[in-house]
Image (cartoon, grey):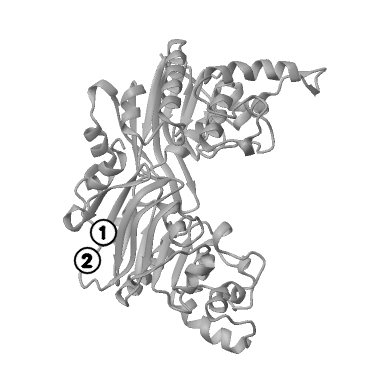
Amino acid sequence: MSRLKLSGVSKAYGATVALSRGDLEIEAGEVHVLIGSNGSGKSTLSKIVAGSVRPDAGRMLLDEKPVDISGPQAARALGIGIFYQELSLAAHRTVEENICLPDLPRKAGFFVDRAALSRKAARYIAMFEGVAGEGFTAESTMEGLRADQRQLVEIMKALASEARILIFDEPTSALDRSQVDRFFEILRRLKGEGRAVVFISHRMDEIFAIGDRVTVIRDGRTVGTSRIPDTTPAAIIRLMVGEQEELVATAPAAVGIGETLLSVRDLAGPGFSHVGFEVGRGEILGLGGLHGQGQSSVLRAIFGALPPASGEIALKGERLAAKTPRDAIRRGVAYVSGDRSRDGVIQGRSIIENLMPIHYLRGRQFIARPADLYARAKPAVEALHTKLAHLGDSINALSGGNQQKIVIARWLIDRPDVLLLDDPTKGIDLSTKADLYALVRSLAANGLGILLYSSEDAELLANADRILVFNGGRVTRELAGAERTRYNLYQAAYEAA
Protein backbone atom coordinates (compact mmCIF):
# COMPACT_ATOMS: atom_id res chain seq x y z
CA MET A 1 0.00 0.00 0.00
CA SER A 2 1.27 3.47 -0.90
CA ARG A 3 1.88 5.43 2.28
CA LEU A 4 3.20 8.62 0.62
CA LYS A 5 3.27 9.70 -3.03
CA LEU A 6 4.78 12.86 -4.54
CA SER A 7 4.21 13.81 -8.17
CA GLY A 8 5.82 16.64 -10.12
CA VAL A 9 7.06 18.49 -7.03
CA SER A 10 9.26 21.52 -7.78
CA LYS A 11 11.11 24.24 -5.87
CA ALA A 12 13.16 27.22 -7.04
CA TYR A 13 15.00 29.93 -5.14
CA GLY A 14 15.01 32.86 -7.53
CA ALA A 15 16.89 31.73 -10.64
CA THR A 16 18.25 28.63 -8.88
CA VAL A 17 16.11 25.54 -9.46
CA ALA A 18 16.61 23.15 -6.56
CA LEU A 19 13.98 20.66 -7.73
CA SER A 20 12.30 20.66 -11.15
CA ARG A 21 10.32 17.41 -11.00
CA GLY A 22 10.44 15.28 -7.87
CA ASP A 23 8.47 12.02 -8.00
CA LEU A 24 8.57 9.60 -5.08
CA GLU A 25 6.31 6.80 -3.87
CA ILE A 26 6.91 5.16 -0.49
CA GLU A 27 5.12 2.02 0.65
CA ALA A 28 4.31 0.95 4.18
CA GLY A 29 6.85 -1.54 5.54
CA GLU A 30 9.77 -0.59 3.31
CA VAL A 31 13.10 1.22 3.48
CA HIS A 32 13.17 3.38 0.38
CA VAL A 33 16.60 4.68 -0.58
CA LEU A 34 16.94 8.14 -2.14
CA ILE A 35 20.23 8.75 -3.95
CA GLY A 36 21.76 11.44 -6.13
CA SER A 37 24.92 13.50 -6.47
CA ASN A 38 25.67 16.67 -4.52
CA GLY A 39 22.98 19.27 -5.21
CA SER A 40 20.68 16.88 -7.08
CA GLY A 41 17.64 17.80 -4.98
CA LYS A 42 17.44 14.96 -2.44
CA SER A 43 17.47 17.15 0.66
CA THR A 44 15.04 19.64 -0.89
CA LEU A 45 12.57 16.83 -1.60
CA SER A 46 12.94 15.57 1.97
CA LYS A 47 12.38 19.02 3.44
CA ILE A 48 9.23 19.42 1.37
CA VAL A 49 7.86 16.18 2.83
CA ALA A 50 8.83 17.34 6.34
CA GLY A 51 7.15 20.72 5.89
CA SER A 52 10.25 22.87 6.33
CA VAL A 53 10.19 23.90 2.64
CA ARG A 54 7.05 24.82 0.71
CA PRO A 55 6.98 23.51 -2.89
CA ASP A 56 6.18 25.78 -5.82
CA ALA A 57 4.17 23.09 -7.60
CA GLY A 58 3.29 19.41 -7.45
CA ARG A 59 0.93 17.01 -5.72
CA MET A 60 1.29 15.02 -2.51
CA LEU A 61 -0.85 12.06 -1.38
CA LEU A 62 -0.77 10.64 2.14
CA ASP A 63 -2.51 7.26 2.45
CA GLU A 64 -3.88 7.96 -1.05
CA LYS A 65 -5.54 11.25 0.01
CA PRO A 66 -4.38 14.71 -1.15
CA VAL A 67 -2.55 16.65 1.54
CA ASP A 68 -0.96 20.09 1.88
CA ILE A 69 1.84 20.21 4.46
CA SER A 70 1.97 23.81 5.66
CA GLY A 71 4.92 23.47 8.02
CA PRO A 72 6.95 21.18 10.33
CA GLN A 73 4.20 21.03 12.98
CA ALA A 74 1.65 20.03 10.36
CA ALA A 75 4.04 17.29 9.15
CA ARG A 76 4.45 15.95 12.68
CA ALA A 77 0.67 15.96 13.15
CA LEU A 78 0.37 13.86 9.97
CA GLY A 79 2.90 11.33 11.31
CA ILE A 80 6.03 12.44 9.46
CA GLY A 81 9.39 12.65 11.23
CA ILE A 82 12.82 13.62 9.90
CA PHE A 83 16.52 13.40 10.71
CA TYR A 84 18.20 16.43 9.16
CA GLN A 85 21.68 16.26 7.67
CA GLU A 86 22.49 19.46 9.59
CA LEU A 87 22.05 18.49 13.25
CA SER A 88 19.55 20.61 15.19
CA LEU A 89 20.53 19.99 18.80
CA ALA A 90 20.51 22.33 21.79
CA ALA A 91 24.18 22.49 22.80
CA HIS A 92 23.68 23.22 26.50
CA ARG A 93 20.84 20.75 27.04
CA THR A 94 21.12 17.12 28.09
CA VAL A 95 20.76 14.03 25.94
CA GLU A 96 17.30 13.25 27.31
CA GLU A 97 16.12 16.84 26.87
CA ASN A 98 17.24 16.89 23.23
CA ILE A 99 15.53 13.57 22.48
CA CYS A 100 12.21 14.91 23.74
CA LEU A 101 12.66 18.51 22.59
CA PRO A 102 10.06 18.49 19.76
CA ASP A 103 7.37 17.17 22.12
CA LEU A 104 8.21 17.78 25.79
CA PRO A 105 5.96 15.90 28.26
CA ARG A 106 4.07 18.40 30.39
CA LYS A 107 2.04 18.42 33.58
CA ALA A 108 -0.60 20.94 34.58
CA GLY A 109 -0.55 22.00 30.91
CA PHE A 110 2.57 24.16 31.32
CA PHE A 111 5.41 22.65 33.39
CA VAL A 112 7.77 20.04 31.92
CA ASP A 113 7.15 16.63 33.47
CA ARG A 114 10.74 15.66 34.21
CA ALA A 115 9.91 12.11 35.27
CA ALA A 116 7.93 11.44 32.09
CA LEU A 117 10.69 13.04 30.02
CA SER A 118 13.30 10.73 31.55
CA ARG A 119 11.14 7.64 31.01
CA LYS A 120 10.48 8.54 27.38
CA ALA A 121 14.14 9.28 26.60
CA ALA A 122 15.36 6.12 28.36
CA ARG A 123 13.50 3.96 25.84
CA TYR A 124 15.46 5.39 22.90
CA ILE A 125 18.79 5.57 24.72
CA ALA A 126 18.41 1.86 25.48
CA MET A 127 18.15 1.09 21.75
CA PHE A 128 21.83 2.03 21.36
CA GLU A 129 23.09 0.54 24.62
CA GLY A 130 26.59 -0.84 24.22
CA VAL A 131 27.47 1.13 21.06
CA ALA A 132 27.01 4.78 22.13
CA GLY A 133 30.48 4.94 23.68
CA GLU A 134 32.07 6.27 26.84
CA GLY A 135 30.57 9.29 28.55
CA PHE A 136 27.16 8.91 26.90
CA THR A 137 24.41 9.16 29.51
CA ALA A 138 20.95 10.67 29.72
CA GLU A 139 22.39 13.59 31.72
CA SER A 140 25.31 14.33 29.34
CA THR A 141 25.15 17.71 27.60
CA MET A 142 25.67 17.99 23.84
CA GLU A 143 28.78 20.16 24.09
CA GLY A 144 30.66 17.32 25.82
CA LEU A 145 29.81 14.61 23.28
CA ARG A 146 31.73 13.37 20.24
CA ALA A 147 30.37 13.87 16.71
CA ASP A 148 29.10 10.28 16.47
CA GLN A 149 27.33 10.57 19.82
CA ARG A 150 25.61 13.81 18.80
CA GLN A 151 24.46 12.11 15.62
CA LEU A 152 23.01 9.25 17.67
CA VAL A 153 21.02 11.77 19.73
CA GLU A 154 19.58 13.26 16.54
CA ILE A 155 18.58 9.76 15.41
CA MET A 156 16.96 9.09 18.79
CA LYS A 157 15.07 12.38 18.51
CA ALA A 158 13.66 11.33 15.14
CA LEU A 159 12.72 7.89 16.47
CA ALA A 160 11.01 9.49 19.47
CA SER A 161 8.51 11.12 17.14
CA GLU A 162 7.02 7.62 16.63
CA ALA A 163 6.14 8.79 13.14
CA ARG A 164 4.61 6.45 10.57
CA ILE A 165 6.90 7.95 7.93
CA LEU A 166 10.53 8.58 8.91
CA ILE A 167 13.08 10.37 6.73
CA PHE A 168 16.79 9.95 7.48
CA ASP A 169 19.04 12.33 5.52
CA GLU A 170 22.58 10.86 5.72
CA PRO A 171 22.17 9.58 9.29
CA THR A 172 25.28 7.37 9.28
CA SER A 173 27.90 9.90 8.10
CA ALA A 174 29.61 10.14 11.53
CA LEU A 175 28.80 6.66 12.90
CA ASP A 176 31.15 3.71 13.31
CA ARG A 177 30.39 0.21 12.05
CA SER A 178 28.83 -1.09 15.26
CA GLN A 179 26.58 1.97 15.51
CA VAL A 180 25.47 1.58 11.89
CA ASP A 181 24.70 -2.11 12.45
CA ARG A 182 22.56 -1.29 15.48
CA PHE A 183 20.75 1.47 13.59
CA PHE A 184 19.98 -0.93 10.74
CA GLU A 185 18.56 -3.42 13.23
CA ILE A 186 16.20 -0.70 14.43
CA LEU A 187 15.20 0.20 10.85
CA ARG A 188 14.37 -3.45 10.11
CA ARG A 189 12.21 -3.56 13.22
CA LEU A 190 10.39 -0.39 12.16
CA LYS A 191 9.85 -1.88 8.71
CA GLY A 192 8.33 -4.96 10.34
CA GLU A 193 5.90 -2.68 12.20
CA GLY A 194 4.66 -1.30 8.89
CA ARG A 195 6.47 2.02 9.06
CA ALA A 196 7.75 3.69 5.90
CA VAL A 197 11.39 4.82 5.95
CA VAL A 198 13.16 7.11 3.47
CA PHE A 199 16.93 6.57 3.73
CA ILE A 200 19.39 8.96 2.07
CA SER A 201 22.99 7.77 1.92
CA HIS A 202 26.08 8.12 -0.26
CA ARG A 203 27.44 4.75 0.83
CA MET A 204 26.68 2.10 -1.75
CA ASP A 205 27.29 -0.79 0.67
CA GLU A 206 24.68 0.65 3.08
CA ILE A 207 22.15 1.10 0.30
CA PHE A 208 22.32 -2.58 -0.62
CA ALA A 209 22.41 -3.69 3.02
CA ILE A 210 19.23 -1.92 4.17
CA GLY A 211 17.18 -0.80 1.14
CA ASP A 212 14.15 -2.42 -0.48
CA ARG A 213 13.85 0.04 -3.38
CA VAL A 214 15.98 2.91 -4.65
CA THR A 215 14.98 6.14 -6.37
CA VAL A 216 17.61 8.16 -8.24
CA ILE A 217 17.44 11.96 -8.55
CA ARG A 218 19.59 13.74 -11.13
CA ASP A 219 19.77 17.51 -11.67
CA GLY A 220 16.54 18.14 -9.75
CA ARG A 221 14.50 15.39 -11.46
CA THR A 222 13.53 11.86 -10.49
CA VAL A 223 15.02 9.63 -13.20
CA GLY A 224 14.20 6.11 -12.02
CA THR A 225 13.12 3.71 -9.29
CA SER A 226 14.27 0.09 -8.96
CA ARG A 227 13.98 -2.80 -6.54
CA ILE A 228 17.33 -3.28 -4.80
CA PRO A 229 17.57 -7.01 -5.70
CA ASP A 230 17.03 -6.10 -9.37
CA THR A 231 19.83 -3.52 -9.71
CA THR A 232 23.57 -3.09 -9.21
CA PRO A 233 25.87 -0.29 -8.01
CA ALA A 234 27.04 0.27 -11.60
CA ALA A 235 23.45 0.59 -12.85
CA ILE A 236 22.64 3.14 -10.13
CA ILE A 237 25.70 5.22 -11.00
CA ARG A 238 24.76 5.17 -14.70
CA LEU A 239 21.31 6.52 -13.78
CA MET A 240 22.95 9.27 -11.73
CA VAL A 241 25.22 10.21 -14.63
CA GLY A 242 22.60 9.88 -17.37
CA GLU A 243 23.44 10.76 -20.94
CA GLN A 244 26.64 12.42 -19.74
CA GLU A 245 28.00 9.02 -18.68
CA GLU A 246 31.19 9.44 -20.66
CA LEU A 247 31.36 13.24 -20.41
CA VAL A 248 35.06 14.07 -20.43
CA ALA A 249 36.35 17.08 -18.56
CA THR A 250 36.54 20.21 -20.65
CA ALA A 251 39.62 21.47 -18.81
CA PRO A 252 42.75 21.01 -20.94
CA ALA A 253 45.07 18.21 -19.95
CA ALA A 254 47.88 19.39 -17.74
CA VAL A 255 50.59 20.80 -20.02
CA GLY A 256 53.45 23.09 -19.25
CA ILE A 257 53.26 22.43 -15.52
CA GLY A 258 56.29 23.94 -13.83
CA GLU A 259 58.19 23.23 -10.65
CA THR A 260 56.43 21.69 -7.68
CA LEU A 261 55.03 24.46 -5.51
CA LEU A 262 53.17 22.49 -2.87
CA SER A 263 53.99 19.01 -1.63
CA VAL A 264 51.90 17.06 0.89
CA ARG A 265 53.09 13.78 2.38
CA ASP A 266 51.03 11.33 4.49
CA LEU A 267 48.90 14.10 6.01
CA ALA A 268 46.42 13.08 8.71
CA GLY A 269 44.03 15.02 10.92
CA PRO A 270 40.37 15.26 11.95
CA GLY A 271 38.37 13.62 9.16
CA PHE A 272 41.27 12.62 6.85
CA SER A 273 44.32 10.35 6.79
CA HIS A 274 47.23 9.26 4.56
CA VAL A 275 46.71 12.14 2.13
CA GLY A 276 49.55 12.93 -0.26
CA PHE A 277 49.90 14.89 -3.50
CA GLU A 278 51.92 17.55 -5.33
CA VAL A 279 50.75 20.74 -7.04
CA GLY A 280 52.91 22.21 -9.79
CA ARG A 281 53.28 25.82 -10.85
CA GLY A 282 50.45 26.55 -13.29
CA GLU A 283 48.37 23.53 -12.28
CA ILE A 284 44.77 23.35 -11.01
CA LEU A 285 44.44 20.23 -8.87
CA GLY A 286 40.82 19.33 -8.07
CA LEU A 287 39.61 17.63 -4.90
CA GLY A 288 36.49 15.63 -5.71
CA GLY A 289 34.14 13.19 -4.04
CA LEU A 290 31.04 13.58 -1.93
CA HIS A 291 30.66 16.48 0.45
CA GLY A 292 32.29 16.00 3.85
CA GLN A 293 34.89 13.38 2.91
CA GLY A 294 37.83 15.40 4.25
CA GLN A 295 38.50 17.78 1.34
CA SER A 296 37.81 21.00 3.25
CA SER A 297 39.71 19.75 6.29
CA VAL A 298 42.82 19.09 4.19
CA LEU A 299 42.70 22.63 2.76
CA ARG A 300 42.25 24.14 6.23
CA ALA A 301 45.13 22.04 7.56
CA ILE A 302 47.46 23.36 4.85
CA PHE A 303 46.32 26.90 5.68
CA GLY A 304 47.02 26.46 9.41
CA ALA A 305 43.37 26.76 10.43
CA LEU A 306 43.21 23.09 11.42
CA PRO A 307 46.55 21.75 12.69
CA PRO A 308 47.20 18.27 11.26
CA ALA A 309 47.99 15.37 13.58
CA SER A 310 50.83 14.11 11.40
CA GLY A 311 52.44 14.38 7.97
CA GLU A 312 54.57 16.88 6.09
CA ILE A 313 53.75 19.96 4.00
CA ALA A 314 56.38 21.72 1.87
CA LEU A 315 56.07 24.99 -0.06
CA LYS A 316 58.62 25.56 -2.84
CA GLY A 317 60.80 22.84 -1.35
CA GLU A 318 60.85 24.24 2.19
CA ARG A 319 58.88 22.86 5.11
CA LEU A 320 55.59 24.64 5.76
CA ALA A 321 54.47 24.15 9.34
CA ALA A 322 51.77 26.79 9.57
CA LYS A 323 50.47 26.82 13.12
CA THR A 324 48.06 29.63 12.25
CA PRO A 325 46.67 31.14 9.02
CA ARG A 326 48.93 34.13 9.67
CA ASP A 327 51.98 31.88 9.17
CA ALA A 328 50.60 30.48 5.90
CA ILE A 329 49.66 33.91 4.55
CA ARG A 330 53.15 35.29 5.14
CA ARG A 331 54.63 32.31 3.26
CA GLY A 332 52.41 33.01 0.23
CA VAL A 333 49.41 30.73 0.76
CA ALA A 334 45.89 32.06 0.13
CA TYR A 335 42.57 30.50 1.18
CA VAL A 336 39.07 31.28 -0.10
CA SER A 337 36.05 29.64 1.54
CA GLY A 338 32.52 29.36 0.21
CA ASP A 339 31.29 30.18 3.71
CA ARG A 340 31.51 33.96 3.42
CA SER A 341 29.89 34.69 6.78
CA ARG A 342 32.34 32.50 8.71
CA ASP A 343 35.60 32.77 6.79
CA GLY A 344 35.38 35.78 4.51
CA VAL A 345 33.35 38.93 4.91
CA ILE A 346 33.99 41.41 7.73
CA GLN A 347 30.38 42.37 8.34
CA GLY A 348 29.45 46.01 8.81
CA ARG A 349 32.78 47.34 7.49
CA SER A 350 33.52 49.08 4.20
CA ILE A 351 34.51 47.34 0.98
CA ILE A 352 38.02 48.80 1.15
CA GLU A 353 38.45 47.51 4.71
CA ASN A 354 37.41 44.05 3.50
CA LEU A 355 39.93 44.22 0.66
CA MET A 356 43.08 45.25 2.54
CA PRO A 357 43.72 43.02 5.61
CA ILE A 358 45.93 40.53 3.73
CA HIS A 359 47.98 43.37 2.25
CA TYR A 360 48.52 44.82 5.75
CA LEU A 361 49.47 41.40 7.15
CA ARG A 362 51.94 40.43 4.43
CA GLY A 363 53.55 43.87 4.38
CA ARG A 364 53.48 44.20 8.19
CA GLN A 365 51.99 47.66 7.72
CA PHE A 366 50.30 49.65 10.45
CA ILE A 367 49.67 52.96 8.66
CA ALA A 368 48.55 53.49 5.06
CA ARG A 369 47.42 56.42 2.91
CA PRO A 370 43.84 55.99 1.60
CA ALA A 371 44.89 57.04 -1.91
CA ASP A 372 47.48 54.24 -2.01
CA LEU A 373 44.92 51.69 -0.83
CA TYR A 374 42.40 52.64 -3.48
CA ALA A 375 45.07 52.48 -6.20
CA ARG A 376 46.14 48.98 -5.12
CA ALA A 377 42.60 47.67 -4.68
CA LYS A 378 41.11 48.88 -7.96
CA PRO A 379 42.86 46.45 -10.38
CA ALA A 380 41.93 43.43 -8.22
CA VAL A 381 38.27 44.48 -8.06
CA GLU A 382 38.11 45.16 -11.80
CA ALA A 383 39.66 41.77 -12.64
CA LEU A 384 36.54 40.11 -11.20
CA HIS A 385 34.03 42.51 -12.79
CA THR A 386 32.75 43.42 -9.34
CA LYS A 387 29.61 45.56 -9.34
CA LEU A 388 29.87 48.33 -6.74
CA ALA A 389 29.35 52.08 -6.46
CA HIS A 390 32.31 53.10 -4.28
CA LEU A 391 35.02 51.29 -2.32
CA GLY A 392 33.99 53.24 0.77
CA ASP A 393 30.49 51.71 0.77
CA SER A 394 29.53 49.03 3.28
CA ILE A 395 30.24 45.44 2.25
CA ASN A 396 26.64 44.66 3.22
CA ALA A 397 25.40 46.80 0.32
CA LEU A 398 26.70 44.16 -2.12
CA SER A 399 24.99 40.98 -3.29
CA GLY A 400 26.33 37.65 -2.03
CA GLY A 401 28.14 37.02 -5.31
CA ASN A 402 29.85 40.41 -5.26
CA GLN A 403 30.80 39.95 -1.61
CA GLN A 404 32.55 36.73 -2.62
CA LYS A 405 34.37 38.59 -5.38
CA ILE A 406 35.69 41.05 -2.77
CA VAL A 407 36.88 38.12 -0.61
CA ILE A 408 38.79 36.72 -3.61
CA ALA A 409 40.09 40.11 -4.72
CA ARG A 410 41.80 40.71 -1.36
CA TRP A 411 44.24 37.89 -2.22
CA LEU A 412 45.10 39.35 -5.62
CA ILE A 413 46.54 42.61 -4.31
CA ASP A 414 49.70 40.79 -3.19
CA ARG A 415 49.90 37.74 -5.46
CA PRO A 416 50.30 34.43 -3.51
CA ASP A 417 52.14 31.31 -4.71
CA VAL A 418 49.39 28.82 -3.85
CA LEU A 419 45.64 29.42 -3.84
CA LEU A 420 43.37 27.11 -1.84
CA LEU A 421 39.74 27.25 -3.01
CA ASP A 422 37.30 25.60 -0.58
CA ASP A 423 34.00 25.30 -2.49
CA PRO A 424 34.34 28.98 -3.45
CA THR A 425 31.20 29.29 -5.60
CA LYS A 426 28.71 28.00 -3.03
CA GLY A 427 25.56 30.12 -3.15
CA ILE A 428 26.59 32.47 -5.97
CA ASP A 429 25.03 33.00 -9.39
CA LEU A 430 26.16 31.53 -12.71
CA SER A 431 27.60 34.80 -14.03
CA THR A 432 29.77 35.24 -10.93
CA LYS A 433 30.92 31.62 -11.22
CA ALA A 434 31.98 32.23 -14.80
CA ASP A 435 33.95 35.33 -13.77
CA LEU A 436 35.62 33.45 -10.92
CA TYR A 437 36.74 30.46 -12.97
CA ALA A 438 37.97 32.64 -15.83
CA LEU A 439 40.18 34.37 -13.25
CA VAL A 440 41.29 31.04 -11.71
CA ARG A 441 42.44 29.75 -15.08
CA SER A 442 44.20 33.05 -15.73
CA LEU A 443 46.00 32.85 -12.37
CA ALA A 444 47.12 29.30 -13.14
CA ALA A 445 48.39 30.40 -16.55
CA ASN A 446 50.44 33.05 -14.76
CA GLY A 447 52.16 30.52 -12.52
CA LEU A 448 50.02 30.02 -9.42
CA GLY A 449 49.46 26.53 -8.05
CA ILE A 450 45.77 26.05 -7.29
CA LEU A 451 43.96 23.49 -5.14
CA LEU A 452 40.24 23.47 -5.92
CA TYR A 453 37.54 21.68 -3.94
CA SER A 454 34.03 22.02 -5.34
CA SER A 455 30.82 20.24 -4.34
CA GLU A 456 29.70 20.66 -7.98
CA ASP A 457 31.23 17.94 -10.12
CA ALA A 458 30.79 19.94 -13.33
CA GLU A 459 33.06 22.69 -11.96
CA LEU A 460 35.85 20.21 -11.28
CA LEU A 461 35.51 18.55 -14.68
CA ALA A 462 35.52 21.92 -16.43
CA ASN A 463 38.50 23.43 -14.62
CA ALA A 464 40.83 20.90 -12.97
CA ASP A 465 43.89 19.40 -14.71
CA ARG A 466 43.75 16.41 -12.36
CA ILE A 467 41.12 15.30 -9.82
CA LEU A 468 41.84 13.47 -6.56
CA VAL A 469 38.66 11.68 -5.45
CA PHE A 470 38.14 11.54 -1.69
CA ASN A 471 36.18 8.75 -0.01
CA GLY A 472 36.11 8.26 3.75
CA GLY A 473 38.84 10.82 4.36
CA ARG A 474 41.32 9.27 1.91
CA VAL A 475 42.25 9.75 -1.71
CA THR A 476 40.89 6.62 -3.40
CA ARG A 477 41.56 7.50 -7.04
CA GLU A 478 43.32 10.04 -9.23
CA LEU A 479 41.63 11.03 -12.49
CA ALA A 480 43.80 12.56 -15.20
CA GLY A 481 43.54 13.02 -18.94
CA ALA A 482 40.77 10.97 -20.57
CA GLU A 483 39.90 9.39 -17.20
CA ARG A 484 38.34 12.66 -16.07
CA THR A 485 34.75 11.59 -16.79
CA ARG A 486 31.61 12.09 -14.76
CA TYR A 487 31.11 8.33 -14.58
CA ASN A 488 34.59 7.69 -13.16
CA LEU A 489 34.14 10.54 -10.68
CA TYR A 490 30.84 9.11 -9.39
CA GLN A 491 32.12 5.55 -9.32
CA ALA A 492 35.14 6.49 -7.19
CA ALA A 493 33.04 8.70 -4.90
CA TYR A 494 30.27 6.16 -4.25
CA GLU A 495 32.16 2.90 -4.02
CA ALA A 496 32.46 1.42 -0.54
CA ALA A 497 35.47 2.83 1.29
SS class, disc 2: loop
What residue appears at the point 53 percent right and 37 percent down from the top-left corner?
147
Across and down, in percent, residue 181 comes to 41, 22
Q: Which residue is mark 2?
A: 254
Q: Is residue 338 left or right of residue 459?
A: right
Is residue 308 in view from this perspective?
yes
Q: Are marks 2 and 1 in contact (CB under 8 Å)?
A: yes
Across and down, in percent, residue 188 comes to 42, 16
Around disc 1, counting alpha carbons within 10 Å, would you say few (fewer than 14), some (14 to 19), or many (20 or more)? many
Q: Amino acid at mark 1?
A: Arg
Q: Which corner quadrant holds the C terminus?
A: top left
What residue appears at the point 31 percent right and 25 percent down from the top-left corner?
208
Residue 241 position (above or below residue 110): below
Around disc 2, counting alpha carbons within 10 Å, would you say few (fewer than 14), some (14 to 19), or many (20 or more)? some
Q: Which residue is mark 1?
A: 466
Q: Amino acid at mark 2?
A: Ala
Across and down, in percent, residue 169 comes to 46, 33
Across and down, in percent, residue 170 comes to 44, 34
Q: Is residue 450 left or right of residue 333?
A: left
Q: CA distance from mark 2 to mark 1?
A: 7 Å
Q: Is 283 or 345 nearer to us in this picture? A: 283
SS class, disc 1: strand
